[in-house]
Image (spheres, rainbow, N blue to C red):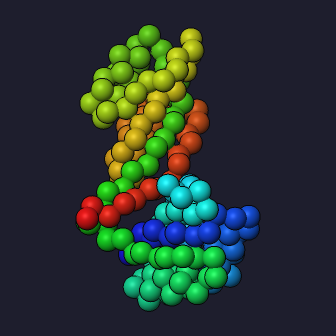
Amino acid sequence: MKGIFSVLVENQAGVLSQISGLFARRGFNIDSLAVGETEKRDVSSMTIVSTGDERTIDQVEKQLNKKIDVIKVRRLEELSCVTREMMLIKVAYTAVTRPQIVEICLINGAKIVHMSPKHMTIEMTAEPDEILNFIELMRSFNIKEIQRTGTVALNKD
């Protein structure tokens, strides 16, 4: 089971360390973590994705709510929220493979942001599953490097 948590925290030094330490001490896995300042400079938003059984996900929520620097914890349901992730992927190409890569990018809404004589860097923003599918499509083109932001999410309502 996947748990998506939107956590508002006080924007101060050490809060990220406290939250990640909580996960480490309890043996909870963090699949994805994205942190950024909100419209209020003194508040940051964390989107944390974790996996586990129902009991584990419930425990994650309870433990997050106990932290002093945590302002609010919301557990988001996958079907009632919008999730996105951004990825940069560098792939090798040749004169033969270049048109194939360009076509795959067009079909999947990815954008080529840099080209050198042997490599291209592609940017894609999509749902996490679409990012994984795109990575699989690129595997045959010799992936050189991947950087992913982690999931960000907002309730649809």
Q: Position of residue 67 (x, y in %)?
A: 62, 82
Q: Position of residue 99 (x, y in %)?
A: 35, 16
- Classify residue 18 by image quadrant: bottom right
Q: Which residue occupies 42% across, 75% down?
A: 74
Residue 142 vertical placement versus 131 (above, below)? above
Residue 129 vertical placement versus 49 (above, below)? above
Q: Which residue occupies 74% across, 64% down?
A: 13
Q: Which residue occupies 48% across, 23% down?
A: 113
Q: Is residue 125 left or right of residue 66?
A: left
Q: Which quadrant of the rendered structure holds the C terminus? A: bottom left
Residue 37 vertical placement versus 31 (above, below)? above
The number of callouts visible is 0
Q: In the depicted view, which residue is nearer to us: 98 or 45?
A: 45
Q: Which quadrant of the rendered structure holds the N terminus? A: bottom left
Q: Is residue 25 left or right of residue 74?
A: right
Q: Position of residue 121 (x, y in %)?
A: 52, 26
Q: Is residue 122 left or right of residue 27?
A: left
Q: In the depicted view, which residue is nearer to us: 156 or 50?
A: 156
Q: Which residue occupies 38% across, 24% down?
A: 101
Confirm whether residue 96 shows in the render: yes
Confirm whether residue 31 shows in the render: no
Q: In the depicted view, which residue is nearer to us: 126 or 154?
A: 154
Q: Position of residue 73 (x, y in %)?
A: 47, 76
